[in-house]
Amino acid sequence: MENGSTAMDNGTKQPLLSPREDQQAQSYFLRPSNASFASSFVADADDIGPITGPRDFFREFAVESKKLWYLAGPAIFTSVCQYSLGAITQTFAGHVSTLALAAFSIENSVIAGFSFGIMLGMGSALETLCGQAYGAGQLDMLGIYMQRSWVILNSTAVVLMLFYIFATHILRLIGQTEPISKAAGQLAVWMIPQLFAYAFNFPIAKFLQSQSKIMVMAWISAVALALHTVFSWLFMLKWGWGLAGGAVVLNASWVFIVVAQLLYIFSGTCGRAWTGFSWKAFQNLWGFVSLETWYFMALVLFAGYLKNAEVAVDALSIWLVQILHDYFVLVPPSS
């Protein structure tokens, strides 16, 4: 300490490095490096090896495609099955009457489509949160995030329920014809259970996908689609219930999907990811809104202003079924 204080008193500066060490450091940083990236990179066991020709390319392409479709295939299948529930009901509605088809198209594309866009966007926020929690090893947060999303989405569903209840007046206010507005408004009231099924289903989907539990979702959706097809024909055509029968079956199909997935989660198959309900679900709540499906709703809505509105809405809704099937294959909302 005395030597240090003496040096400071004399105004001298002590170098951090000795002249020899300083020269070695400068020569290390300034000398050119001949090492290539290939020689310094050490590949893991799962990394793709060097591709030296077409044979290596096609071999690795087949391997990577298999890995991709192992995850994407069931996700696409799940999305198509769940979307097809409404498409099948719409198909049977066309066998009931032209008005029934137009009413279901308006309700499914405008009323339910409006809610679907909000629920999907808000539920999609879990995709990032659950992915981060799973990657960080905080599996217990997956269940907390899902419960928080349930709280947010069910609260939103309560607000959106007013849109269902007053659908007839809203459709008339924006210029839809009286028969279509009345039939679609009545159907919208019947479809309120589907709204709350959305609020549960989208967070569950992100919760399971973050753990790569895709196959169980695919199996549940496949069973639901098969049962939905049979019972839709039975209720809507065989027993002559019409749109009322379609609403009963469509609501029951969505409730079946939600209950089956919850039973899978509660059975303990998710391990630490689900440890039960927690009061933490009511902390740090935050909402998310997406507009990604609303432009389809606008197309069907504007078709109602055309001459011969029932036929225009029917034609557009049939085209829309095909377009959305292709969309969900390329960009599945549960992927």
Image (cartoon, rainbow, N blue to C red):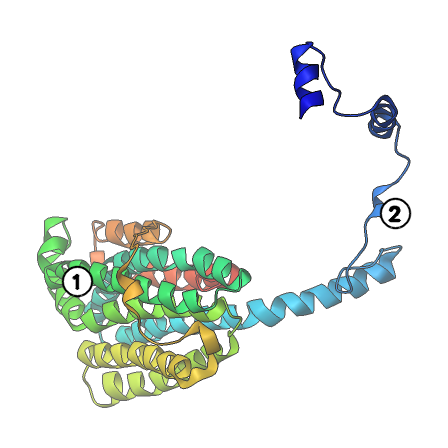
Is disc 2 surrounded by few (<14), some (14 to 19) or many (20+) residues within 10 Å? Answer: few
| Quarter of the view holding residue 66 | bottom right
**Residue at the image point whose x is 51% and y is 74% from the top:** 214
| Quarter of the view holding residue 73 | bottom right
Left or right: residue 333 versus residue 114 is: right
Could you say where residue 44 lies in the image, as x and y percent from the top left? 77, 60
Could you say where residue 272 lies in the image, as x and y percent from the top left? 46, 75
Eye-nearest disc, 2 or 1: 2
Spatial CA span between label 2 and label 1: 61 Å
Could you say where residue 232 lies in the image, as x and y percent from the top left? 29, 83
Per the rendering, the mark at residue 256 is none
Q: Nearer the viewer, residue 288 or 163?
A: 288
The reply to whether residue 310 is in sight is no
Is disc 1 surrounded by few (<14), some (14 to 19) or many (20+) residues within 10 Å? Answer: few
Q: Which residue is mark 1?
A: 158
**Residue at the image point whose x is 47% and y is 78% from the top:** 271
Secondary structure, mark 1, is helix
Q: Which residue is mark 2?
A: 39
How many circles with numbers are drawn on the protein? 2
Q: Amino acid at mark 1?
A: Val
Q: Amino acid at mark 2?
A: Ser
